[in-house]
Image: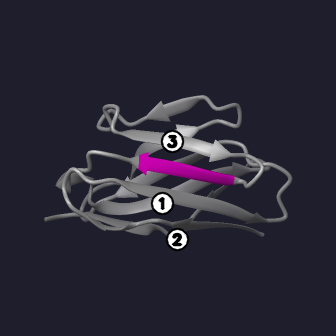
Amino acid sequence: QVQLVESGGGLVQPGGSLRLSCAASGSIDSVDAMGWYRQAPGKDRELVAAIGSGGDTNYGDFVKGRFTISRDNAKKTVYLQMNSLKPEDTAVYYCNADVSNRNYWGQGTQVTVSS
């Protein structure tokens, strides 16, 4: 059984920063693609950023250089550094990972950007 455990969400003022972490645990030899999605109330879940096992990255258009995704393969952990946060970034952020041709989701972590 594979589990994804997220941490790092919270309340931050506009213009502030947060760093999300997601660690994969269980019977895992290696993790393939990892990524972050978000879902705001009343909206569809959307891709924030993804990173392949080799380090290739992909970002949602709204990121515009504000967020950086990275990973530590030895720790089976993916990170999302979010800078210049805006109120419209408020959402539940979900970790996603491909392990042995199966896709897994974390439980989500709330990010609230408000003054």
Q: Residue furthest left?
A: 115
Which quarter of the rendered picture does the N terminus lie within? bottom right
Q: Residue at x 46, y 65 (%)?
A: 8
Q: Residue at x 29, y 37 (%)?
A: 62
In the displayed structure, 43 sits above or below 53; it is: below
Identify the image quadrant of residue 22: bottom right
Q: Are marks 1 and 3 in contact (CB under 8 Å)?
A: no
Between disc 1 and disc 3, the foreground one is 3
Look at the image and give the residue range highlighted in magenta: 77-81
* Residue farthest toward the front in the current orientation of the protein: 16
Q: Are marks 1 and 2 in contact (CB under 8 Å)?
A: yes
Q: Which mark is residue 69?
A: 3
Report the front residue among 89 and 38.
89
- Which residue is label 1 attached to? 94
Give the crowd class for mark 3: few <14, some 14-19, many >=20 residues within 10 Å: many
Comparing labels 3 and 2, the label whose residue is closer to the camera: 3
Secondary structure at badge 3 equals strand
